[in-house]
Image (spheres, rainbow, N blue to C red):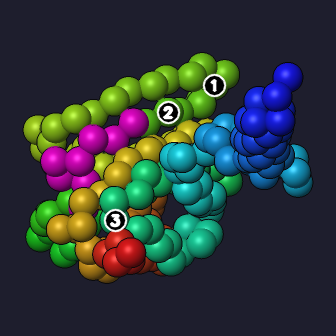
Amino acid sequence: MSSSSFALVRRLCSRASVVAGLAVLLVACGGGEGKQSNAGETTTASSAPDTIEIAMTDYGYEPSEVRVTAGEEVTLRFTNEGSVEHYFVVGDTIASSQDGFEQNLFSGVSITKNKQTDGADDEEEEHEEEEGGHENVFELPPGGSGSMTFTLPAAKAGTYTIACFETTGGEKHYQMGMEGTLTVTAPEAE
């Protein structure tokens, strides 16, 4: 083997070592989606939806103030810790009938609802506004739990009222203090 052939082989081996070293470094640093990093954490391109726990009590919501970001998938997970059925309804102005809002926050928004009541799981997906404007009503009997998952568009940014329109003793639960706010913030500019 001539000295020029030997130099060529040495350069090729050196480059192969550099490429192999970079590949090992990328894998070790978690350079790919779903790969484990040195810390043992998994990274993914799309994050799981934000989950907010909400307890329905007699007669309130805990927490009573909820914040979500437009454009991000959100799951509200409910438990009814009260002794009567409760609703979670979101809108702007309470209608003159006192049975709902004049405009519902979720009008035209796809919502996936899951409920666990009496040991049974029910799932329903709603894509369009229902007749009667109750697409955003999430009701649970005492001891029930469930969730609703949705993504609100930026056009829905603002602060809305949360209320329960169930009646006990001739009075609406929101009149007894079961109300709160849901604030939809515009997505942050990147």
Q: Which of 48 and 93 is in front in this view?
A: 48
Magenta stretch in the rendered image: 105-112
Total labels drawn: 3
Q: Is 180 placed above or below 20 here?
A: below
Nearer the observer: mark 2 or 1; the answer is 2
Distance (Cα) linking label 2 and label 3: 21 Å
Q: Relative to residue 127, is residue 52 drawn left or right?
A: right
At a point 63% along the width and 25% down the height, the residue shown is 118
Q: At which x and y percent is residue 56?
A: 58, 59
Q: Earlier in the sequence, mark 2 or mark 3?
A: 3
Helix, strand or loop status at disc 2? strand
Q: Is 44 placed above or below 102 here?
A: above
At label 2, which amino acid type do we have?
Answer: Asn
- Residue pointed to by mark 3: 70
Magenta span contains residue 9: no
- Residue pointed to by mark 2: 114
At a point 56% along the width and 68% down the height, the residue shown is 61
Magenta span contains residue 110: yes
Q: How crowded is mark 3: few (under 14 residues within 10 Å), some or many (20 or more)?
A: many
Q: Is the magenta stretch mostly helix, strand or loop?
A: loop
Q: Is 107 placed above or below 105 here?
A: above
Q: Nearer the viewer, residue 144 or 39?
A: 39
Residue 140 showing in the rendered view: yes
Q: Give me the disc on residue 97.
A: none
Q: Residues within 10 Å of mark 2 (few under 14, many from 20)?
A: some
